[in-house]
Image (cartoon, rainbow, N blue to C red):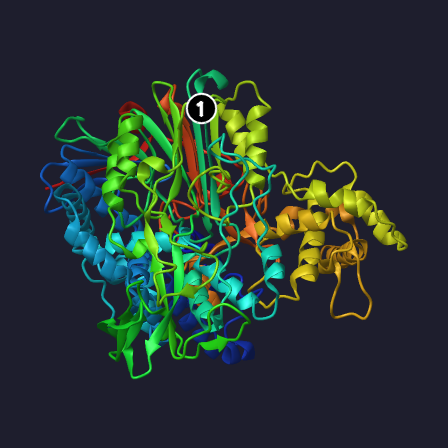
């Protein structure tokens, strides 16, 4: 009996192991609270037998449900060994996967290579791909029901799918063939699987939307996802709306103080152009109340990961004369919203052999849903990216014809809007028609929020009645992003690399470059508008040409540098150019704390090794601490307990380490200080921490500034008063939450990362969330820190954005290169590769970035052959 019990429970998860099994009509009890079996014929048996029968039935049902659950979970796991037929291939394709499930694909033609990439992406991540394409096309209600209609209305109004359709119509033959091959690979997988066989999420979705069936993949689905990423990374619409809302209650100089200029002592990317530019003046006319529009933008940001605390990235490249290898080292880590699975998918794409007919040999990070590699290296060059953050979005106030709501004024004449009729389908069979209006600038966003009202302001231009608000944005014009992606993957040198980036129109990125000949470089691509007037800081009149775009900065005049004298290039979303640059790129650079620290650490070493680069990736130096700690220590405390707690900061190295007690106390102090300073501002319109760091750094030197005063009290607080109160708040929080023993306070215990499925993982239903979410994991770092695990001071210390990948490329020996993502390669809950990278990632460790075929085969745990 014992042996039979052991065998029966071997495949059942421990929490669900059965407590009793039948054995020849008797019951052997295990772990159910019965210390013994009653003797036959006793009164206890007569009373207990019905209960035991019910118990047996429940146990059998639990067994069946558990086994069904295991079968359902495992149904979606991809086949990774043996052979699979894949109609549409021209030749066999081999896929090697290492122990972490990362595929290296070998094919004889580019068609087969990209088709196999689509197939492998679908094997591991189809739910993610399906969800992403529904975001991009504004079709969430089809999957999740009526509650998503408002989001769909906003997304349809943005019109990403329509622009993607235009891009597809204008795509060159080579790009079309690659996108078609990729889509064919995805669809080859869909032909083999359905429902829970695709992913566990579909089993849950079937309970909510039983009629939903994934449709075939198309190239437009791929192009649409590029628009979603452009939305996350490009423009300043959020801050444009934010300023307009703040001006309802604050004076212009107060609003300007909340958007301080780039610190003069922080580095710029392209040397020799002076201090970062301060551009033209704001428009100061009447403005609409954009709060309803802001709410719609927030809803979409929550879907895509845009507008979050700490979005950004680091990358840097060091020339061979400054490395221990004698050749360049290139590092990259991109900071995006936390999610499950990771936003990135590691892959290697290899032609066998490489020839003019089959040119691809590249490895790195890809998007599930798109062909090629976004960041990585081939056999000649390596590249990394960070977000530039140029101002490429403008809101226009349109003057509407009172007699015809579908006409707007242009230079004194009424012009017809373009009208597009669409239908939103809702799970369950309902439909909802909508009409989208376009002006010469773009979609009328205010149609999603009919209750926008005027905000009277003195001077400037009066707000027209009636009016509408439209958006002009570079991503709403057809581009050639995937032509650029493939061309970068194929580039062999600096000139070819720069040539490829001419088609990288949006989102604009900071590209660092290195090659196997020892060269390094930097190029910023992208369409950045040249405005007739204004600086893009606020909505402007759209009924004249005064604020129109006159074109884009020519590519050859975009910032670039090649083999700079200093021997390194570092970017961290900081200012790209200074005051001598003739064009406005942005007034809203990252504050440069990360950039300053990276440059400091590079310059501190005469030669850098891969281990040194790793140390920079994992640096937890809090750049605000050296500003605030001395000011705090200069204050006298009459409360002996507070004075004693303050001594915890003595000798602190300002590192936000996982086990650091001073870091725990300081971050609590900083949070409460930020809340005291900025809680007077409207909710959701308080500065994020990167900007708040600069604001407070400047305020520390102004002890009598009115910003230190709490307007809710009768007294007038100065700097030291507010610092003292915030520190008292922190001590109260730490003692009440983490105990009186300060030696047990740990930053990691407060600062954790929980990886949540973007859909069902945020359902609010705990058992479903438990299926898909993983964590919490203790992590180091924080906002405006190189190890950028950012948190939101209004919500607490939980990680909101993070380094979504890390990569170090050794141009002396590509097989020495390393990489890591946050969670795992698989998107299937309970798969061994679902969360197996998380501990490596949080420990600032890496996995080999496999390259040579012999290295790949030696590391292979699985080998799959796809056959025609």
Picture coordinates of residue 263 (x, y %)? 60, 42
Q: Residue at x 69, y 60 (%)?
A: 677
Q: Residue at x 32, y 64 (%)?
A: 158
Picture coordinates of residue 58 (x, y %)? 42, 71
Q: Is residue 759 visible?
A: no
Picture coordinates of residue 78 (x, y %)? 27, 48
* Residue 156: quarter of image: bottom left
* Residue 73: quarter of image: bottom left
Q: Is residue 445 visible?
A: yes
Picture coordinates of residue 295 (x, y %)? 46, 69
* Residue 352: quarter of image: top left
Secondary structure under tag 1 reads loop
Whether residue 709 sits left or right of residue 328 in the image: it is right
Q: Residue at x 58, y 35 (%)?
A: 596
Nearest the viewer among 40 and 435 is 435
Q: Is residue 653 above or below residue 724?
A: above
Q: Residue at x 82, y 43 (%)?
A: 647
Q: How many marks?
A: 1
Whether residue 395 sits left or right of residue 442 in the image: it is right
Mark 1 surroundings within 10 Å by alpha-carbon count, few (fewer than 14), some (14 through 19), many (20 or more): some
Q: Is residue 756 above or below residue 415?
A: above
The residue wearing badge 1 is: 564
Identify the image quadrant of the C terminus.
top left
Nearest the viewer among 783 and 591 is 591
Q: Is residue 852 above or below residue 365?
A: above
Extreme front residue here?
A: 412
Q: Is residue 851 above or below residue 145?
A: above
Identify the image quadrant of the N terminus.
bottom left
């Amino acid at each position: 009996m014992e042996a039979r019990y052991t065998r029966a429970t071997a495949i059942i998860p421990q929490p669900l192991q059965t407590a009793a099994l039948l054995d020849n009509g008797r019951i052997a009890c295990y772990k159910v609270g019965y210390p013994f079996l009653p003797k036959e014929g006793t009164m206890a048996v007569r009373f207990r037998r019905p209960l035991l029968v019910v118990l047996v039935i429940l146990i059998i049902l639990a067994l069946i449900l558990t086994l069904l659950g295991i079968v359902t979970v495992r149904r979606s796991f991809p086949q990774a060994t043996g052979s699979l037929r894949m109609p549409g291939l021209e030749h066999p394709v081999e896929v090697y996967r290492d122990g972490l499930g990362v595929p290296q694909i070998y094919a004889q033609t580019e068609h087969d290579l990209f088709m196999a990439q689509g197939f492998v992406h679908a094997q591991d991540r189809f739910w993610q791909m399906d969800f992403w394409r529904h975001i991009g096309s504004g079709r969430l209600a089809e999957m999740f029901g009526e509650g998503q209609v408002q989001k769909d209305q906003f997304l349809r109004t943005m019109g990403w799918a329509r622009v993607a359709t235009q891009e597809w119509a204008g795509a060159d033959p080579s790009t079309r063939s690659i996108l078609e091959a990729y889509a064919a690979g995805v669809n080859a997988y869909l032909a083999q699987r359905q429902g829970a066989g695709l992913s566990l999420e579909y089993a849950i979705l079937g309970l909510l939307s039983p009629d939903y069936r994934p449709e075939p993949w198309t190239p437009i689905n791929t192009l649409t996802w590029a628009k979603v990423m452009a939305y996350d990374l490009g423009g300043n619409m959020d801050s444009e709306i934010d300023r307009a809302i703040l001006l309802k209650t604050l004076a212009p100089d107060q609003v300007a103080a909340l958007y301080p200029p780039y610190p003069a002592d922080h580095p710029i990317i392209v040397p020799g152009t002076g201090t970062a530019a301060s551009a033209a003046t704001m428009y100061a006319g009447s403005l609409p109340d954009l709060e309803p529009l802001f709410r719609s933008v927030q809803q979409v940001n929550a879907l895509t990961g845009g507008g979050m605390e700490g979005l950004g990235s680091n990358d840097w490249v060091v020339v061979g004369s400054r490395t221990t290898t004698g050749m360049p080292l290139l590092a990259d880590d991109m900071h995006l919203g936390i999610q499950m699975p990771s936003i990135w998918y590691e892959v290697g794409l290899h032609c066998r052999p490489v020839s003019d007919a089959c040119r691809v040999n590249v490895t790195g990070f890809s998007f599930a849903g798109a062909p090629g590699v976004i960041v990585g290296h081939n056999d000649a060059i390596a590249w990394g990216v960070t977000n530039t953050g140029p101002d490429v979005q403008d809101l226009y106030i349109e003057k509407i014809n009172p007699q015809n709501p579908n006409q707007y004024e242009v230079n004194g004449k009424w012009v017809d809007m373009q009208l597009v009729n669409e239908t939103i389908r809702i799970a369950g069979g309902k439909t909802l028609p909508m009409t989208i209006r376009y002006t010469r600038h773009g979609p009328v966003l205010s149609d999603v929020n009919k209750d926008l009202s005027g905000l009277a302001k003195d001077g400037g231009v009066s707000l027209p009645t009636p009016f509408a608000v439209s958006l002009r944005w570079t991503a709403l014009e057809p581009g050639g992003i995937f032509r650029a992606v493939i061309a970068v993957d194929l580039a062999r040198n600096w000139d070819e690399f720069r040539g490829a980036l001419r088609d990288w129109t949006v989102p604009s990125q900071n590209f660092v470059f290195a090659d196997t000949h020892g060269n390094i470089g930097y190029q910023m691509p992208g369409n950045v508008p040249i405005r007739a007037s204004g600086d893009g800081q606020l909505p402007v009149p759209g009924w004249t040409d005064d604020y129109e775009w006159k074109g884009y900065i020519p590519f050859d005049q975009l910032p670039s540098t090649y083999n700079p004298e200093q021997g390194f290039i570092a970017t961290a979303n900081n200012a790209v150019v200074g005051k001598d640059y003739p064009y406005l790129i942005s007034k809203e650079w990252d504050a440069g704390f990360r950039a300053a620290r990276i440059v400091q650490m590079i310059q501190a070493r005469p030669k850098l090794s891969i281990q040194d680069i790793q140390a920079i990736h994992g640096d937890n130096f809090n750049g605000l601490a050296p500003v605030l700690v001395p000011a705090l220590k200069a204050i006298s405390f009459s409360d002996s307990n507070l004075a004693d707690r303050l001594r915890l900061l003595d000798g602190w190295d300002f590192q936000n380490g996982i086990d650091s007690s001073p870091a725990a106390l300081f971050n609590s102090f900083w949070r409460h200080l930020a809340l005291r300073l900025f809680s007077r501002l409207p909710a959701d319109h308080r500065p994020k921490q990167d900007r708040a760091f600069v604001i407070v750094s400047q305020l520390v030197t102004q002890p009598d500034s009115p910003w230190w005063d709490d307007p809710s009290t009768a007294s007038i607080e100065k700097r030291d008063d507010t610092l003292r109160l915030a520190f008292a708040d922190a001590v109260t929080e730490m003692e009440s939450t983490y105990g009186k023993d300060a030696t047990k306070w740990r930053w990691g215990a407060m600062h954790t990362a929980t990886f949540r499925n973007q859909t069902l993982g945020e359902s609010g239903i705990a058992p479903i969330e438990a299926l898909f979410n993983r964590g919490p994991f203790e992590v180091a770092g924080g906002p405006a820190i190189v190890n950028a695990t950012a948190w939101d001071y209004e919500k607490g210390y939980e990680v909101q954005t993070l380094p979504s990948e890390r990569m170090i490329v050794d141009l002396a020996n590509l097989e020495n290169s390393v990489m890591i993502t946050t969670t795992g390669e698989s998107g299937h809950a309970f798969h061994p590769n679902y969360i197996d990278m998380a501990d490596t990632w949080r420990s600032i460790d890496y996995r080999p970035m496999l390259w040579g075929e012999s290295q790949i085969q030696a590391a292979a745990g699985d080998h799959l052959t796809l056959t025609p």
